[in-house]
Image (cartoon, coloured by chain):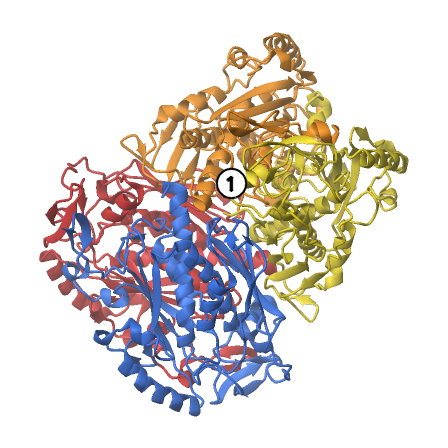
Chain colours: A blue, B red, C orange, D yellow
């Protein structure tokens, strides 16, 4: 009932605060005899790691993961896999300023309202640092899914600027710091984000995650529909405020005769001629690409002063000094990929439980 | 692990197919000594019931609910509450046409892919009829929340037509068949939907649910954030393909300094000057209105022929005869309200478990 | 989190009070395409039904089960199976005597302490009538397990009288009202129980459940060990106060060199020479018979006066008039079998989820 | 669904193998603002630690616990508490002998049958070393329960030798290495166990756990009865094969009129004159002491040769060299206490969720 676990058959529990000694997670339910060593996880953590370009937080965390249990001679054993990442760059700085503050857009006020206490150092448990655990667990999920399932993410909008989907290139995604599939847009975003960073502002983003090779039949109607679990998964990421599958909101504006994916027999099997549904019908995967998009609100930490209050009931001006991400959206790409992997791995095992394959 | 339950501390399990003898649900975890009789539930079912205007399915279901357990002398006892609704209007019609069909936009193909068998009569388990159980369970949730929490829903977009939010009136919602808060829009929608219905097409919709009076502190970071659970809840409703909280997707396009809710002390307590966040920060309720919007895709059953295939691997033309909803969105309004109530009641009890109040 | 569900991958939720309109359960997670009609369930309910001999309660309940959902044309569809049993013999009697009473050995006091309210008619939710739901759900579990798993139960002790295990005959179990495997003991018990019944007393019992054909590998270390789940399952049956697996308590008194099951290759496969462990090692099934025994305390309803108190804080004498079971143990036999089936079916699906078979 | 978590509202997940780098657990759901520092946990670990007398394994583990998250300035924050214990004494010995062996009484065969792979070093995940995590999590549970609940355990039988319950002294428990409440018996056991150890044999034991100060009303009927959860908790401990509450098995042999706890008003409140029920009725706590007993089978590791087989399908003689516990029962005492605390803390929070206190 507490909220730090995700999944059912494939389940993990994350723990740790931004400025504690370490963060980590325990992954339970992974099938046995899957090859798993640290580099399998490290590669994805490296992708999420801050400080890799001038557009992300300059916090210097090596994010080195250690596997503490659950594998033997390079294979999973079916027992829980404990993953640990030490916090290295928790600077011993003076927190007296932030200690009693309720900053706009942050979780300061709500944690205080809920628990009556909070670890205010670096955002504590509410820090985006927690997403490293998602990426680590997601790396295990990818291994469970196997090479047949390909999960890729991209940033398709930065602030108000959308990509041109006609120019989509997965190759491009790997070649710019934004995970942007439109090389032209990426170029423009660079200048834009530099300006945003300089004036101490921030931008939101829209991220798209696509999973290919997902077999038809995954998803548990009626409350654990594949899309329902994906919505929960993505909405649980820090700063995410919206999720859509396939056509999503746009689909509501299309007349019925154009809104659905018609079918024809192709190469002897039932096939969809389009994928407006984003890979699910009735909450169950269709075999088409599973396509999810989510919106990330602009980073809350700003150099521009904002109105806040403090624990003593005083009105205050809030300015965030020091390192921050001008657009946290790009770092959400590997996190969204991980959440996709985690949802799919869980549903793959659940499907196997009930239906045998 | 199977998918027919919702909630943790306040939990219900729904069952039943469109054309079986009955549908129902079991609500477990309701606090004891809450007044609960059938009319408390019936009033909400009546609001969802089809056949109340020419704009909804002409299926004639009285949707009469019976409480079979869990209450004694008009009060809940803390034991499971079993709710039963008989299916009355399951016409003994000929299903030979639909039996083997994979219809576009329906769950025919995916249920078959998942289970290798399906009850094809009226959509079986995938029928929107299941949502009556949500409304019934949601009625119990409202009693658990008490009169301090007010949950209201409205249809804010039909097809491509959005309401004018400046003209929002909760009064208007009760006065048109669309639950539309903009009386002018409602008028226009009537003509529009008549035309849509006549040409055998259908429209999607966007529905907004607002909960007022929600105390600060509800929601379980990090995976069971209040918004994550709301996203799952809404996305689990039939035909829903997108969910957003507060500013949602629009919020991604706003610069940081304008995107967050600033705070000031008002009447001696920390207050938000706006509610762009839609009532949650860090996944925990702020005390402001909780605001969720979701998109419903157009009804899949159309008089306009569409391309489908059948179980025998043949290409076919699909036309849905008989009753259907030209815009299922309006019937999703009471369902969305119910899901909001169910999420909030669950989190209220979960909060009480950990934090004592 | 509420307590009326059992199982994870194969899960059911029971509901209903002794004197409400009906009792029932919802079984979720059953694999699709399993043949299931009402007689599959009814046969086991008939075995548990009261009023079949002079040694059980004379309550006349036909216990006729109806399947309300989850099957189609005689096969399970993978959707929840709702089972309903109407309460027929809830005599409209005067409850003024029992209404405010805390009877020794009953749950009157604790339900009142917990909930502050209780349905006192016939024991309400605490009535052994709830066990009919276990038997019904257990019948579905047996179908999930398939014919390869044979689950049988027997009463091996009545009051202080143990059977002679040398004379164990499964045939005998079917031929006496006690499910006693020792025909000689059964004969003696008849006279004994007649005397007990006449003097208004009651007896406890020990019941043994044996499952044959259980494959090696079921059970989830470390907290959901097969034996841990069996212990919970059996201890959750009304009036059960003790559970043991294999040698159980007696095993604690045996020196190590005699306490464990030695192994030899037999017919080319690793085999156990004895089964002192009762079919589990490290919480995982060994492939040997799974053997569980549990103790049922004597029926609490007695004609012999006992000291109790009432809601108004008065000392009272308690005498139970009317029908009751002088030894409820025999009715626990089919219930124990059902719980065994439910635990095994759940673990079979869980094993399939993680390990694929 | 995987089996390494325990509890619902108060929930922990344990991980780690005997000879991996560390073991640990994540405790989720602890209420905020509870004082918690490492010594609060260490004191209980020290009680369980091996190598403290000649009667326990000579493995030298300091079992030093570290709190990695979930507290701030000495108080719990409501976020997950990660506890880590390094494995220090995993001697780099030669495992070639045990590698392929299925030893009688051990989990070698069943882990292999379940997972097709196992970490054979020191028993891997099946090692009793895992119980250190239970003790650590249990220490947090004790803090949640507060000083009003007193949990104590004792060894009441070693091999066939029972204590004289008339001589029960909690003081004595602290004064002998067996946690034996009968000082005379403890004396006799010393000589006995020395002899057992010398001849390379082992003994089983019966352990009794008593919780005082438990409020009436804890436990969730019908499947999560307090006694059902206790049964699962105790049966999940390594080597435990039997559990009973109150009179347990002995209660089955007592006639009804003597088997139940009669009630009288005492000091103005309903009181039980005896506690044969062991503190629960209908699965809910009565306010009396909660009394659980469980049987531990003799240690499986013996110097006396036993018949086993190996992975290559050969018959072998098995002799365990090196350190082992001649009676593992005494080390189960702190573990049983911990499990009692964990069950009670979980039910305390669950009760608060539903009933508000």
The image shows residue D62, relative to residue B3, as above or below, that is: below
Q: Given the image, what chain letter belongs to the residue carrying mark 1?
A: D
Q: Is residue D56 left or right of residue A205?
A: right
User: Residue C270 or C241: which is nearer the viewer?
Assistant: C270
User: Residue D126 or B309: which is nearer the viewer?
Assistant: D126
Q: Which corner quadrant of the image does residue C147 belong to?
A: top left
Regarding residue A314, the answer to whether it shows in the image is yes
Coordinates of residue A344 in the picture (x, y in percent): 38, 55
Count numbered badges in the picture: 1
- For image coordinates 79% across by 49% down, the residue present is D51
User: Residue D114 or A209: which is nearer the viewer?
Assistant: D114
Of the 4 image quadrants, the one containing the C terminus of chain C is top left
Q: Secondary structure at mark 1?
A: helix
The image shows residue C145, relative to residue D50, as above or below, that is: above
Q: Which residue in the structure is indicated by mark 1?
A: D114
Q: Is residue C279 left or right of residue B24?
A: right
């Amino acid at each position: 009932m507490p909220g730090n676990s995700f999944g059912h058959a494939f389940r993990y529990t994350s723990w740790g605060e931004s400025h504690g000694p370490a963060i980590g997670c325990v992954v339970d339910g992974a099938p046995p005899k899957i090859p798993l060593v640290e580099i399998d996880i490290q590669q994805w953590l490296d992708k999420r790691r801050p400080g890799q370009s001038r557009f992300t937080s300059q916090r210097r965390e090596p994010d080195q993961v250690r596997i503490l249990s659950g594998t033997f001679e390079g294979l999973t054993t079916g027992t829980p896999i404990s993953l640990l990442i030490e916090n290295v760059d928790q600077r011993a700085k003076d927190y007296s300023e932030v200690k009693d503050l309720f900053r706009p857009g942050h979780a300061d006020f709500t944690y205080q309202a809920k628990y009556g206490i909070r670890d205010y150092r670096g955002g504590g448990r509410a820090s985006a640092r927690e997403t490293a655990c998602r990426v680590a667990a997601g790396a295990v999920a990818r291994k469970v899914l196997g090479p047949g399932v390909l999960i890729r993410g991209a940033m398709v909008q930065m602030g108000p600027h959308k990509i041109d989907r006609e120019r989509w290139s997965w190759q491009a995604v790997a070649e710019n710091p934004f995970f942007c599939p439109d090389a032209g847009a990426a170029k423009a975003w660079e200048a834009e984000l530099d300006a945003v960073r300089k004036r101490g502002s921030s931008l939101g983003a829209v991220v798209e995650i696509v999973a290919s090779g997902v077999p038809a039949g995954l998803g548990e109607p009626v409350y654990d529909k594949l899309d329902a679990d994906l919505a929960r998964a993505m909405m649980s990421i820090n700063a995410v405020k919206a999720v859509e599958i396939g056509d999503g909101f746009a689909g509501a504006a299309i007349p019925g005769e154009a809104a659905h994916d018609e079918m024809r027999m192709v190469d002897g099997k039932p096939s969809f001629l389009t994928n407006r549904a984003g890979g699910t019908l009735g909450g169950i995967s269709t075999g088409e690409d599973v396509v999810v998009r989510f919106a990330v609100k602009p980073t809350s930490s700003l150099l521009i002063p904002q109105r806040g209050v403090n624990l003593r009931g005083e009105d205050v001006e809030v300015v965030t000094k020091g390192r921050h991400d001008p657009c946290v959206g790009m770092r959400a790409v590997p996190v969204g990929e991980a959440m996709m992997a985690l949802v799919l791995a869980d549903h793959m095992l659940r499907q196997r439980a009930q239906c045998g394959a």
